[in-house]
Image (spheres, rainbow, N blue to C red):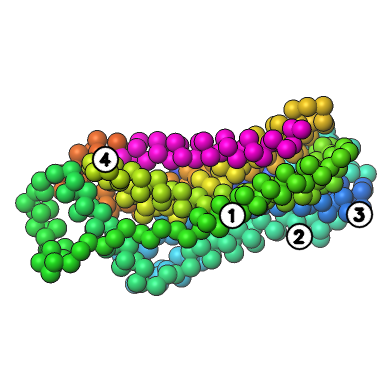
Amino acid sequence: MLALRLARGAHPLVQLRRLLVAAASAGTGFLLLCTLAYALEHPGAGAVLRLTWCLAPIAATVYFAVAVARTDPGTRPRSGLSAVGLGPTRLMVLATVSTAVACALGSMVALLFFLHLRGDVSGLPFDGAAADMLAAERPLPLAGALTLLAVVPLTASAASAFALRPRPAKANTKTTAKTKTTAETTTEATGAEPGSESGSESGSESGSAPADGAEPDAPAPPPSGLPWGVALLAAGLAVETYASGSDGGPRSGVPMPGGADGSSGGVLAGWALTALGLMLAGPGLTYLCGRLLQAVRPGALRLLAGRVLQEEARRVGRPLGVLCAVASAAYASIALYAGPRPQAGPLTALGGLLVAGCVVLTLAMAAVEARQSREETTAALLRLGAPATVLRGSAALRAGALAAVFGPLTWLVAELAALPLAR
C-alpha cells in the first residue's frame, strides 16, 4: 500500500516514465502471446525459434525498467527516512514493487488487446481483426499465456532489486570526496572567486587537504571492459562474415516473426557478439572521450566536461554502446531486406520499434541519473560563483564529444555488418 501511495503522489514526469515502462511491457507481452498463438498452429522447433526472437525485446524492456527504477526519486535515500523505517532496503523493496506493478499493468493490457484481436472479447472496434493470424479457432491455454506474461514483471523486478541493492557506506563517502574534488578543480580552472559565506563553508569542509599538502583525489579509474569489448566486436564481425559467406543458397535458418525468412544462425550469433562487444566497450570509449577533452592545456570548459565524462563513464557509456549496437543492427537489417528478399512483417517491425525505443529511453534515463548524481557538484559550483554558461557549455561539449566518437563508430560497424549481408 505504501508503494501505491508513493506512486500516486509522484511527479507527472515520474508517472510518465512508469507509463512508458507499462507500454514497453505491453508490447513485449503481446509479442510473447503472438508466439504462443503461432505455436498452437505450428507445433515444433519453429515456435521455439520465434520465441528466441522475443529475447531482444524482453532484454530491452527489462533494461529500460531498471533505468526508470534507478531514476525514481522515491528510491533515493534522504535524511530522516531511516528514522521512520524507510532505510535503503525498504526503499529498494518499494522500487521493486513499483516496477512489478507497472510491468504487470502492461502485461494485462497486452492480454486484453490480444484477446480482443482474436475475437474473444467483443463489443469494441476491430473486434477479431487478426483472428486468422492469432489462431482464434484454437482454445488459448490460460496457464501458458499467464506464464509468458509473467516473464517481464518477474525479470524486471528481480533486476531492479539487484540494481538498487544497498551499497556499503564506503562507496558513498568516496563519491562525496570525488564530488568535492571536481568542484574545487573546476572552480580553480574558472577562476571564480567564492563569496565570503560560501568560501568559509568550503574552507571548513575541505581546508584540511591543502594544509596537509595532500593531493586531490584522482578521477575514477578507467573501465576495464574496453579490450574485451573490442575483441568481442572483432569476433562478432568475423563470425558474421564467415556465416554469410558460407551460405551458398537461399537464406534460411532462423525465421523472423511476421513472415520473413530470416538469416542463418551464424549471422545472428555474430550480431549478438557485436552487440555485446559494443556494450562492453562503451564505458571505456566514454572515459577516453573525457581523457581527450582534458588533453593539451585544457580550459575550464574542457576540464569540467572531461572530468564529468570520466566520472560518468560507466553510467552513460553502457547505454551508448547498446544504442550503437541497435543502430548498426538496424542499418544491417535495412540492407538485408532492401533487395528481393521478403520484407519484415508487422511483428518484426513491432519488435524492432520496442528495442529501439527502449534503448533510446534508457539512454535518456541514464542522462537523468547522471544529472541527479551531479546535483551536489552543480550546487557547489553555483555557490562558488561559477557562471551558468560554463555548465551549459560543458554539457554541450560532452554531447559533441560523444557524438564525434560514437557516430563514426556506429557507421563503421554498420557498414562492416551489412557488407557480407548485401552480397
Q: Is residue 396 on the magenta stretch?
A: yes
Contact? badges 2 and 1 (CB < 8 Å):
no
Quarter of the image with the C terminus in it:
top right
In the image, which disc is placed on residue 301? 4
Contact? badges 4 and 2 (CB < 8 Å):
no
In the image, taking residue 22 as reference, residue 143 lies left or right, namely right
Q: Which residue is mark 3?
A: 44
Q: Which residue is mark 2?
A: 147
The kind of secondary structure the magenta stretch mainly shows is helix
| Gap between marks 2 and 1 measured at Cα | 37 Å
Between 145 and 412, the one lying in front of the other is: 412
The amino acid on which the numbered mark 4 sits, given as a three-letter code, is Leu
Residue drawn at the location 50% of the way across and 50% of the way down: 282
Q: Residues within 10 Å of mark 3 (few under 14, many from 20)?
A: few
Is label 4 or label 2 in front? 4
* Circle nearer the N terminus (4, 2): 2
Q: Which residue is mark 1?
A: 231
* Circle nearer the N terminus (2, 1): 2
Please give the range of residues in magenta. 394-423
Residue drawn at the location 41% of the way across and 49% of the way down: 288
Contact? badges 2 and 3 (CB < 8 Å):
no
